[in-house]
Image (cartoon, helix red, strand yellow):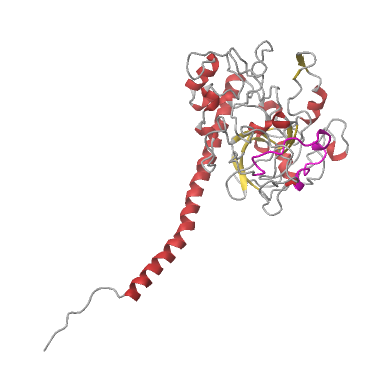
Amino acid sequence: MNRHARSTGLTLIELLIVIVVIGVLVGLMLPAVRSSREAARRMSCSNNFKQVGLAFENYHSAYKQLPMQMGGTFDPSSDSQGTSPPGNNRYRLSALVALLPFLNQQQAWQRIETGIATSGDVVYSPMGPAPWTRDFEPWQTDYPDFRCPSDPGVGFPAHGRSNVAVCLGDATDSIDTGATRWSRQTQSWVTDRGDAVAASGRGAFVPRQVMRWGDILDGLSNTILAGEISTDLGDGDKRTTGSLLNPWDMIHDSPTLCENQIDSGRPMFWNDGDEGPENIGAADQKRGFRWADGAALYTGFNTVLPPNREVCMAGGEAGIGMLPASSRHQGGAHVLMADGAVVFMTESIDCGDPTVGTVILGGEGPRAPDSPSPYGLWGALGTRGQGEVIEEQLNR
């Protein structure tokens, strides 16, 4: 009797079935893998914000005040841009600069204090040159605690990038300079905006003004200290490429002023045609592109529009306007509360009536200087002393 050897291999049909099954399994697993990676990046981002919160606390313990936004030095005798030695930082440093020693960046801080440039052969004035100076290495460095791993932006044309921005409150009038500004006419510092800033400077940070924990009357756990912003990728994203030259006489009155400049077919991007922004600034004038620059476009945000809405300003890259929080996470962005807690705020947070203009000197009704924020829970969390009662349980 002949015995036939039994075949142990796979037929072509069986092999195809196995390949299909493996493909289906991989397809099912990929979203879970991506989701777990993003969850890890989001957790890392939250941890970085906690470190920044601890740095703010330690700074306040050491100096009995918060670091100043838009502080530094100014020497009118040096070049107009502050970029040629001895230079000056044009009184425009962000509050983040002073946090470096409290984030284990002592070497960078020492270079800033001494003004030593990249090559070591050039020395600027103490506290460094203007924050857009290319050959000053500390201004061009990405510091890990100021970055969020979910943000893929790196390198030129940015200077040092930051995903951290301080909270400027829920109003805009004169919050580009604060009460103290340089007058080109008189070639001197003037404080002619004091009354306007007293009315509209309602956040934990007010440009060129010393702020302390004692100024936060609503309670540290009810007040936002800083928030997350995305950095620009050069793609016309409305969250990171600002519409910069809108009318001054409308920017405070109409928070939704720039809605008609958005591409209706791509709601996260500006329209490329004549209906788009009049001006989006130079290549290095984008959201989060200068960690050391205290101008609001780079390291400030306000609680008027909800997270991930459009950046809409007047006055160019050093101006002011609607500067929402933003992120590369799904559905919201992190904020750092003054008590050190980190909260993920969703895009659907209560923002009151975004068609109401911001609080302003001489305003009435919801725009009166001492009124509660017209922008709901989001606006209330951005103010430091308006007496709003926070009844909602934040996601802590």
**Residue 338 seen in render:** no
Residue 187 lies within the magenta run: no
Question: x, y (%) of residue 83?
Answer: 61, 18
Rendered position, 121 above or below 170: above
Locate residue 63, reporting x and y percent. Answer: 60, 19
Is residue 247 toward the left or the right of residue 85 in the image? right
Question: Quick check: can you spot residue 29?
Answer: yes
Q: Position of residue 299 (x, y in %)?
A: 63, 32
Q: Say which quarter of the image contains residue 344.
A: top right
Residue 199, quarter of the rendered image: top right
Q: Residue furthest front?
A: 274
Nearest to the observer: residue 387 or residue 93: 93
Looking at the rendering, in which quadrant would you find the N terminus? bottom left
Q: Which residues are magenta?
A: 237-260
Magenta span main SS = loop
Q: Nearer the viewer, residue 322 or 313?
A: 313
Q: Nearer the viewer, residue 396 or 346?
A: 346
Instruction: Tell me what residue is drawn at x 80 percent, y 16 percent.
Output: 185
Q: Residue at x 81, y 45 (%)?
A: 355
Residue 96 appears in which quarter of the rendering? top right
Judged from this view, the residue extending furthest toward the left is 1
Horizontally, residue 268 falls left or right of residue 43, namely right
- In the picture as drawn, the residue positioned furthest to the top comes out as 77
| Quadrant placement of the C terminus | top right
Residue 60 vs residue 315: left or right?
left
State the image coordinates of residue 43 (x, y, percent, origin top left): 51, 44
Q: How many marks?
A: 0
